[in-house]
Every structure is written in C-alpha cells, then in structure tokens.
Amino acid sequence: MTDSSLAIVVLAAGQGTRMRSATPKVLHPLAGIPLLGHVLATAQALDAAHLVVVVRHEREKVAAAVVELAPEAVIVDQDEIPGTGRAVEQAVAAIPAGFAGDVLVLSGDVPLMDADTLAAVLADHRRAGGPVTLFSTVVDDPTGYGRIVRDADGSVLRIVEQKDASEAERAITEVNAGMYVFGATALREKLAGVTTANAQGEKYLTDVIGALHGDGHAIGGIVVADEWKVWGVNDRAQLAQVGAQLNALTVRGWQLAGVTIVDPATTWIDRAVTIERDVTILPNTQLHGATAIAEGATVGPDTTLVDTEVGRNATVRRTDATLAVIGDEASVGPFTFLRAGTAIGTDGKVGAFVETKNAQIGDRTKVPHLSYIGDAEIGEDSNIGAGGITANYNGVEKSRTIIGKAVKSGAHTVFVAPVRIGDGAYTGAGALIRRDVPAGALALDVAPQRNLEGWVHAHRPGSASDLAAQQAAGPAEAQD
C-alpha cells in the first residue's frame, strides 16, 4: 500500500565528468539496466506517495529514461545554482506544500542499495522521532567522501566534505553514503538558509545536518554494515566494481534457486534474465536482456544469449544468439550464430558453423553444419546437407526460401530465393536451385563430368602435382 507519509527524491542531475563519456553517468548500463533504473526500482518498491527525480546534465536523455522507467515520477530541472542542497530544495518545492511526512533522498548513481535496508532505516528514523537520519558506512580509504564527525558520545555533529576537511577530519573512516531521511518541515526550513560559502561554491545538502545540530536537534546516523550497498559510481572502474558485486549476488541467487552455475567467476547474468530450476550454466556464459531458460536446459560453455528463449532440456554450446527461440530438446552449436528472428522447433538441430537469420526451422529438422539459412522457413523432419545456403539477397531486395517438411538436401545445395521446395523433395549434391521443386521430386543441377587427361603435365610441367601424377602413372606411361 502507498505510504502517504513518504516522499522520495532521486538526485540525477550530475554531469559525471569522470566517466569520460557521451552517455550521462546515470544512464550507463549495469546488468542490462541503467544505473538510474536500479535506484528507481528500489524507490518504487517503497510505494511512496511522491517520487521526484532531479535532472540537469543531458536533461532530455535522462528525463526520457525516467518517463520510461518510472512514469509516475515528477521530473524537476535543477537551475544554475550548483549543489545537492539546491537540487533537493527544488525537489521539495515540487512536493505538495501541505506534505509533512518524511523525505528520503537517494543518489541516482548508487545502484546497489536495496529496499529492505531503506525500509529498516526509515523505520528507525520514525521511531527516533528526530528531524534527520543519515546513512553512513566505514571504508578503508575514505578519500573523496564526506566524513561523518561525531562527538564523544557517538552522536553525529556534522558532515565535512573532503575539500573542506581538516587533517584530523580527513583521517575519519566513517563516510557519508549520500542518502538521508528528513522530516519535510525541518528540511524546508533549513534548506532556505544554506549558502554556497564553501570551497566548492555549492549549496551542500550536508549543511542542513550542521544547521539542525546547531538548533539542538539529535542527528540520527545509521551505519550500513555492507559497504557495497552504498558504493557510488563515478568512473568506469567503479562501474565495473559495482557490476561485479551485483553479478555475484545475482549468480548466487540463481544458485540458491536450483540453477547449477559451474563457474560463477566467468558467468554474467543480467537482472531481467529468468532461469528455471535444474538448468546448468557452463563457464564463460553471458545471459543478457530478457533471456529466458527453461527447466533442464544446458547453456555453455562460451555462449552469449541476448533476449533469447531456450526450451526445456535444450542444449546450447558455444553459441552467439540474439532474439532467437530455441525449442524444447533442441541442440545448438558448437560455433553457431543465431541472429534475430531465428526459431528452432522441438528437437531441432542447428550445428557447427551455422548462421541463421529470420529463419523458422521446424520440429526435428536438422541443419547440422557449415550452412547459412537466412529469410527461410523449413518444415518439420527435414535435413539440410552440409554447406547449404539460402541465397536470400539479390543486391536490391531480400526474398524468402520456403522448404517443406521431410525435405532432404544434398551437400552444398544453394537455394536462390524466392523459391519453394515441396514436401518430401530431395536435391542432389551441389545443386543450384533457381526454380520451385514439386513435392517428392529430385532436383539435380549437374553437367556431364569431363576428365581432361594430361592437363597438369601440359599446363603445370615440373610442378609438384605433375611429378606426383607421373609417379602414379608408372614408368611406361611417364615416358609417353
């Protein structure tokens, strides 16, 4: 149910210069979802009455992502005044004036914080009854973080940013996590008095903490024991670090759900992937997008699947597949490339060094090896011989090849689209099929074989081939 006493503010206005990227920092993908998407999903899990996202850098791109990820959110544009204090001030102005509940402030570049931890801190804040509770954690190297300064009895006094900290304050290892719960009334009042009189010339949200303490209020501070939950992303190295942590959690979750993952260190699973029990994932496998793997399937090793469905008890080895459907009991690989639009039927086979695209391959049909099947439909119980090609492109347009059921094509058959092969038809080895083949017919495209005796000796005299041929002919013939 909606928490009518909760508003959530997500800060997503920063430029993220250390990412050195044309992509806004909060839109960099993490496990198939933008950084900001993880934060918004966590916020949505709390069912707050109000969700406000503050944007500025690359405003149109970030706002478009917010609309897609959290259409209920209110988007607020930060003005020319820099700093998190100003961002929150403008966000609070977008919340109804009569709102007197709690305001939870989250950072759009801190993707691993979970809803359960937020709910626990929120409950603690409400029990304490103070005007603010901040999140902190203890790190080995606090460089770059705001330090949490406490008094002798452990109460929070203030937060000091790195550039404004004294030498003693810089030695503190408890750091600000950049997330807070404020009482809305106290937050509105104190933000109005925050200035830009600091080394950075910014309006710091952290100055609200000092102002509340100066008025005699107790400042709540919750230390998050799992440091990784509050990791922020400021550069590509941190993005990879956060990604590795998230993937480790994801892999472990699937293992506990009944999935065998042989080598977690070389397995990547995006957040939107679904896997049923008794699936086996072999080393060096990446599962991306909305990939779905049904019970009993084996995927890998050395396999990448993007938005691909794998059926029950199917086997997919050393395969790259995108937007493909692999049926129950089907076998794919090794060294197979399934492009968008491929659908393999139940107990079908697409084997070694085969590429498919926009191809429907029927139940129990086999394309065993060394073939290209593009813009094609093959019926059930057919077999495409080695080196088969559907020549789908004439340089101007692409056309389809329709192959019926129980068709058997000889090795190196080329089907020149558009062409239709009837049920039960055969093709001879090396056939070039330009016209439709009736059901049950044998299509041949061969000329009488000619052997030109002595051609090698006449045209390649003295070559290794010539010498080998003369030795094979024997002394009598070699003298002629």
Image (cartoon, rainbow, N blue to C red):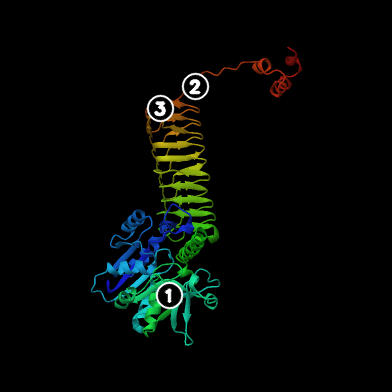
Q: Is residue 1 visible?
A: no
Residue 158 position, x and y percent, is: 44, 79
Q: Is residue 42 above or below residue 414?
A: below
Q: Residue at x 35, y 72 (%)?
A: 104
Q: Is residue 179 above or below residue 25?
A: below
> Is 67 in front, or is 461?
67
Q: Residue 441 bears which disc, if any?
A: 3
Whether the residues at callouts 3 and 2 have beta carbons within 8 Å, the answer is no
Q: Quadrant of the C terminus?
A: top right
Q: Is residue 166 visible?
A: yes
Q: Residue furthest front?
A: 197
How far is mark 1 from mark 3, CA to CA? 76 Å
| Residue type at tag 3 | Ala
- Where disc 3 sits, the SS reads loop
Answer left or right for 64 relative to 150. left
| Residue type at tag 2 | Val
Q: Earlier in the sequence, mark 1 or mark 2?
A: 1
Q: Residue furthest bottom?
A: 153
Residue 148 position, x and y percent, is: 47, 77
| Within-10-Å neighbours for mark 1: few <14, some 14–19, many 20+ | many
Residue 190 position, x and y percent, is: 33, 76
Q: Which residue is mark 2?
A: 446
Answer left or right for 194 relative to 166. left
Q: Residue 135 bears which disc, if any?
A: 1
How far is mark 1 from mark 2, CA to CA? 79 Å
Q: Residue 316 bears which disc, if any?
A: none
